[in-house]
Image (cartoon, grey):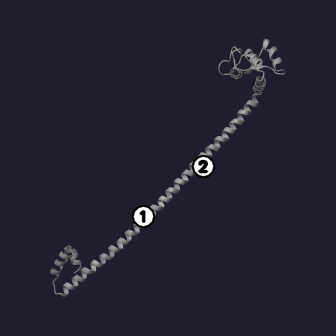
Amino acid sequence: MIFGKLGGRHKKILPHLIPGWKWIFCKNICSSPLTSLQKANKSDGWLTLFSSDEPDVIIGLLEKYPEFRDIYGEAYQICLNIEKVMEMFSEELYMLDRNTEKYMIDVMQNEFGQARNDLQEAKDSLAIKQNVLIETQNDLAEAKNDLDRMGEKYIQSVRNAVEIMRSMGLGEQEIMGRLCGQYQLGEGQAKEFL
């Protein structure tokens, strides 16, 4: 491709192919060029155009395919203006950075949206669990109230029984024995009712 000054017969031939050009060739890291243009088709010519660093091959290619002259001329002009090439790469890198930034923002917004959805689901689940807990606490409080009422009724029924047994003229030992047997109380508990 274009870079490195030409000398000899190439310096004389190339300006006649495309007048006004100062011919310079540069090496390309692509695969080796075609050495015989007689066997080459147009596809091979394209590959050779952008991979050859041999002036003879390029001259032969431009003679065989004159439509390549404008393309090669444009590539030559680009290589002459290194600042423009660097500017072109700078613009591409800027676009790549901008696109990467947009992509990263999109990814973060998606992740943020997913995290927000997950958080909302967790809040909803927590609210459901809190409601279940509140219902359970209410049920427990109601059951405790029921137990307290039943306990009060039990205590009242034991006191009533003690009063009835006293009105029948039973002694404290006998009342205590009946309380322990009928109400399944211990002696200490039975004494509290006497």
Q: In the rendered structure, which disc, 1 or 2, sits on the residue that comes first in sequence?
A: 2
Q: Which residue is mark 1?
A: 133
Residue 164's quadrant in the figure? bottom left
Q: Residue furthest right?
A: 20
User: Of helix, strand and loop, which one carries label 2?
Assistant: helix
Left or right of 105 on screen, residue 65: right
**Numbered tag placed on residue 76 in the rendering:** none
193 sits to left or right of 113: left
Q: Residue at x 66, y 41 (%)?
A: 99
Residue holding disc 2: 109
Query: Where residue 23 sits: x, y (%)?
Result: 79, 19
Left or right: 37 as drawn, with respect to 183? right
Kind of residue sitting beneath label 1: Leu
Residue 60, image x and y in percent? Answer: 75, 16
Q: Is residue 82 above or below residue 133?
A: above
Which quarter shows the C terminus? bottom left
Residue 173 is situated, as x and y percent measured from the top left of the image, at 15, 80
Callout 2, which amino acid? Gln
